[in-house]
Amino acid sequence: MALILVRGVGDVGSAVAYTLFKAGHTVVMHDIPMPSHPRRGMAFADALYRGTAELEGAFAKYARTLDDLGTMVKCGRAIPVIDIELQHALSALQPDVLVDARMRKHRQPESQRGLAPLTVGLGPNFVAGATTDIVVETAWGNHIGEVIKVGRASDLAGEPREIEGHARTRFVYSPVSGTFRTALNVGATVVAGEEVGRIGDTPLYAPLSGCLRGVAQDGASVEIKAKIIEVDPRGSDTVVRGIGERPRKIADGVLKAVRESAIGPAMQRATRR
C-alpha cells in the first residue's frame, strides 16, 4: 500500500482521501491555514478549525507539528490533516503519490512532476505528462472519473448543475479578500436577501431561500472571487453531509489510477535510486 499526500481538504479532496484511506492506503491531507471551503459537511475541512472532523464514519485529525504527524501516520486510525509548508511536508513524508485535489479551476497549475513517484492532477488545466503524470476527469458526464495518461482534462465550460431552476445563482462569490465572519453553519435555513456573513464591512446575502449546503467557516481567510456560500432551494430535503455523487466518482478514478500504477514503497525506493 502507498503513502499518499492529498492537496485540498474540500469536498473533492476529502472524497479522494476517504476512498484511498478505506482502500488501505496511508493518507495525509494538506491545505493552507484557515481555508474557505464551503461544503464543510461533505469534507474534512473543519479539522483545521476544530481539531477533528468526521465524514461517513472516517475521522480526520489536525496535526500541528511534524512530530504529531509522524505519530498519527504510524497510528493509522485517523487521516492527518496538515497546513505546514508543502515542501516541508514532502520532505518529511516522502510520499509515493501526490494528488492535487484543490480544484482551482481558474488557475494554471504549476508542474508537480517529480514531487512524488506518481503525481495526479484533478480537473481543468492539468496535462498528463506535463503538469502531473496522470490526470483524472472531473467534469460531469460519461467520462467523469476517467484516468487520462496522455492529454488533458476537459476545459472549464458551462454552468453548475441546475437545482430547481437555479445554477450559478445558488452561489455567492467573495467580492473582496479578507476574513469571513458568520454566525451560521452548514444546514441552516435562510431566506433570500438575508445576511449570511460579511468580509470586513462588506455584507454577503443569501441569493435565494433554502438551506445552506455550503458556507465557509467563521474566521476563514478568503480570496476575491472565492466561492464561499451555496444555497440549495430544496430546503429540508437538501443533503448537506456525506460524500456527494461527483466527488465519489472522481475519487474512484484516483483510486483506479493508483492501482493501475502499482505505486507503493517498493516502487518508491526503486524510482528514487
Image (cartoon, rainbow, N blue to C red):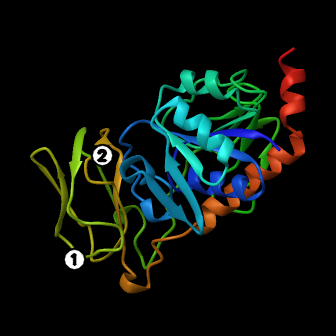
- Name the front one of labels 1 and 2: 2
Hey, which residue is sitting farthest top in the picture? 273
Q: Quadrant of the C terminus?
A: top right
Left/right of residue 191 with respect to residue 133 in the rendered view: left
Local crowd size for mark 2, using a 10 Å CA cut-off: few (<14), some (14–19), many (≥20): many
Q: Which residue matches tag 1? A: 191
For the point 27% across and 72% down, the residue is: 208
Left/right of residue 147 with respect to residue 156 in the rendered view: right
Task: State how many labels appear.
Answer: 2
The picture places residue 19, in percent across and down from the top left corner, at 70, 57
Q: Quadrant of the N terminus?
A: top right
For the point 26% across and 53% down, the residue is: 218
Q: Is residue 104 visible?
A: no
Left/right of residue 249 with respect to residue 188 in the rendered view: right
Report the amino acid beneath label 2: Ala
In this rendered view, identify the residue nearer to me: 77 or 56.
Answer: 77
For the point 83% across and 18% down, the residue is: 272
The picture places residue 108, in percent across and down from the top left corner, at 54, 30
Report the amino acid beneath label 1: Val
Q: Quadrant of residue 144?
A: bottom right
In this rendered view, identify the residue nearer to me: 203 or 154.
Answer: 203
Hey, which residue is sitting farthest bottom in the picture? 236
For the point 65% across and 52% down, the residue is: 16
Q: Quadrant of residue 262?
A: top right
Q: Which residue matches tag 2? A: 220
Earlier-in-chain disc, 1 versus 2: 1
In this rendered view, identify the residue nearer to me: 16 or 105.
Answer: 16
Q: Is residue 3 visible?
A: yes
The picture places residue 175, in percent across and down from the top left corner, at 24, 45
Q: Is residue 56 above or below residue 101?
A: below
Mark 1 vs mark 2, CA separation in Å: 23 Å
